[in-house]
Amino acid sequence: MKRKSLSFVFILSATLNCWSQDAANAENYFENFEYAQAENAYEAVRAKRNLNSEEVEKLGFCYYINGNSSEGLPYINSIITDHSDKAHFWLWKGTLEKESGNYNSAVNSLKKCMSLSSELNTEIQLMIATCNEIQTWKDTPNMSVTNSADNSRYANGSGYVNGQKIHFHEVGLDSAGNFIADPNSNVELQLMLMRPYTLTDNSMREIELFKNYRAYSINAFYIHKPSNKVIFSASRPLEQDASLAVQQIYVGTYVSLQSKLDDVTLWSYSGISDTSSCTHPTLSLDGKQMVFSKSGSNIQGSDLYRSIYKNGSWTTPVPLTELNTLGNEMYPRFLGDSLLIFSSDGRLGYGGLDVYSYAFENENIKHLKAPINSCFDDFNLFWHDTLSGSVVSNRANGKGDDDVWNIKIDPPKPTVSVPSKEFLAWMEKWNLRKIYFDFDSFTSELNAEFIEGCLKYTELYDLQMVLVGHADSRGTKAYNFKLGKNRADWLKQQLLDANVTTEIKSESLGSSALVNNCKPGAFCSEREHQLNRFVEIKLTVNYP
């Protein structure tokens, strides 16, 4: 993702043939959108000679794109005196002032921009509204973000498939057309392709989803368990067919992450039929919903669409009008079945794409505060557990273009040493409580009283939780163990979705700890079998 800017043209300098090597390097970086390297190269040129008019604007643009307010604001202030009629200079100035906390100055600069050009009035009015609102926002307490050591020099991403962490890195073709598969290579790439990797024994292994996929750039994939299909989005930038060169959604038959997909085809609603681009599909935990981002000539920016899996097929996708704005809504991700994480630049936010959550049940949209969000593009939020997660961002001080940033929560230490009668009654009711499940299912109903108690008492007491999944005896031991783990993981995810911040472990005993005599081959009623299908909640508390 890149920042929006007003239309303007870089005029080629008459001294083009006399450029130094630094100037040639700067131009090459700029034309390949490597603005951090271009900024450094233009500064090297500036240290040796005066920049020509084209280089002056390109360096200013780099400061703006990179969000370098400490260097960019003095520079833009120095050139805007002689170019006060150029609207894009005022946009750059106002944006950097906003990001450095000079909100009143930012409002004045942005209003000056609108007086000179109406091209981005809607976006600039949103920025002005944010400048007025942002001064009341407070950072999320006890939370920090750090740059991941797994990032490479180009774009990076993250995800989860079957509980396994997936890394996305840009690889691609060099100037000679050779494919460079190492994301940490020092070779300059001319064509970037995003690929998924697994991390095993501290070594990266590329996931080759299917045969002959070297020309594909893949940015997201999920396993749809009800149909045993992998659903992923990919572009083929070397394709002459423009509809295939942009992101589309594909499906293939899933075996394992170590096996290549069979029958890879475009999804029925991939976007080919209406020449749109569809990307970043996400699936609900039960596999009944898919949400993705769609853009095209008939859509303002990028919008979110939802399709329902019904009677073995997907319904025609419909726009999520309650979420979509005139800006871009992108990077959706389900947390469980009822909570959606997405990014938007069409709402009040710090700047660029900000991360929001949406609860389908009550249609509540929540803007997440810093440090998850920044004044840059922030997206693809994942929670690994109750106290850690990751977000992808092109914020300052990263290693690549888009980087994975690790999120850590340090909950405040509880101060209550004497338990209240209310807490003791809640513990007695819910400790060793069982949540029951239907046959072969890993979703159930969760009591609101339990969640409310978790939210309340984890702030007061050092409360730990172990969730132990169980299954009845029908099925193999291996299958039942996995089913029990899925049930425990489901309950853990529901607590994560509800923002319960305490240590939660999920375990499984499968069918090894039956509560009755319904062993394999024994005749038992469905009611008797159901007594073995549960997750047991084990609560412990440590008093200071």
Image (cartoon, helix red, strand yellow):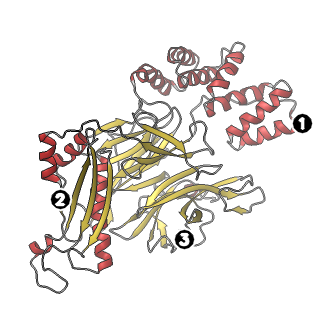
- Which mark is nearer the camera, 2 or 1? 2
Q: Give the spatial CA distance, label 2 vs label 1.
A: 78 Å
Image quadrant where residue 536 sits: bottom left
The residue that label 2 is drawn on is 432
- Residue 502 or residue 452, whichever sits in front: 502
- The three-letter amino acid code for the residue at tag 2 is Leu
Q: Is residue 384 above or below residue 452?
A: below
- The three-letter amino acid code for the residue at tag 1 is Asn
Please provide percent x and percent y for residue 166.
50, 59
The residue that label 1 is drawn on is 17
Please provide percent x and percent y for residue 249.
47, 59
Q: Which residue is pictured at 9% across the width and 72% down the height?
A: 527
For label 3, count other residues whose C-alpha is less than 10 Å away and answer few (under 14), some (14-19) or many (20+).
some
State which tag comes first along the sequence, 2 or 1. Answer: 1
For label 1, count other residues whose C-alpha is less than 10 Å away and answer few (under 14), some (14-19) or many (20+).
few
The residue that label 3 is drawn on is 210
